[in-house]
Image (cartoon, helix red, strand yellow):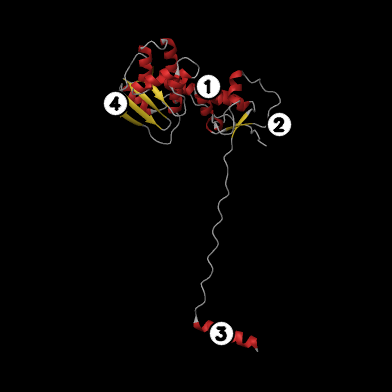
Amino acid sequence: MTVVQTPPPPLPVRDRSATRALSPMLTRLAEERATGVLVREHGTLYLAEGRVVHAESPLAPGLDVLLTAHGTLAAAAWQRAAAQAAGSLQAAELLLEAGLLPAGALELCHLDALYDAGYFTLAPSSTPGRFRYDNAPRIGPLPSVPVVALERETLRRRLMLHRLWPDPAADSAPLIRADPVARPAATAPVTPRQRAVLDRVDGVRTATAIARNLGRQAFHTLVDVRRLAAAGQVAPLAPVVTEPALPPPPPPPPPVTDPDIALLKRLRDALEAL
């Protein structure tokens, strides 16, 4: 039986002015109008003249998924463009130049993918970021965003998730259906968007894997998951705790080789035989 636990008490939210710079390195790069690639633990930011022109994260569906999942672009068209380009941003520009995508739809998907991947890239990290100066990123036909705008939006999203459900465990762990008996008596009805997420909860997929399967932004899926967790519909799969292995038994004592002891044993055996 799965028990839905009460979330921990809300954490105090610091003033935004005190947490505006999520990455001091990124702030410095923006001030010096640097061009290159910033690699962090959970993603990569591409800077041109101090602005973010592209972002990628293994936790967020890429531009290709957002464009092809719902029929905006045929998957074969993307594959042809990707085969001729050095990356997804260049592939998108080729499609734009060829007239295969409406400019407005591409710009919207590009910004969605940028903010989505940027949110995960700027997550707290256990390793320092690395920046490589490179002239490849450039200000192109697709919109770029200032660093301060990306950081402000990332902070807004963190605060929103915390208000919905303060326990972040459901963001990264495999999800399971919660026990109906343990759900609150009165819960809001499940929306069609949430139902699509709920239908893919199988004890294996994480929230970001569900987002990729649905072709949706990962952050929007996190919002649905936290709402479902608050309603007692889903819960993170608890990690399996294995018992520590027992130590091996001690080796047997070495055989007795002392000649005096051996002689005493023979005398004992002889006396017992009388």
Label 3 vs label 1: CA separation? 85 Å
The quadrant in which the N terminus is found is: top right
Q: Which residue is mark 4?
A: 134
Which quarter of the figure has residue 75? top left
Percent of width and height locating residue 58: 44, 29
Q: Nearer the viewer, residue 33 or 78?
A: 78
Q: Secondary structure at mark 2?
A: helix
Identify which residue, 24 or 60, lies in the foreground. 60
Could you tell me the amino acid type at mark 3? Leu
Could you tell me residue 132's position as x and y percent? 31, 29
Alpha carbon distance from label 4 to label 1: 32 Å
Quickly name the residue at label 1: 220
| Cβ atoms under marks 3 and 1 closer than 8 Å | no
Horizontal and vertical percent position of residue 14: 49, 26
Residue picked out by circle 3: 264
Q: Image check: 227 left or right of 146?
A: right
Q: Residue at x 71, y 31 (%)?
A: 181
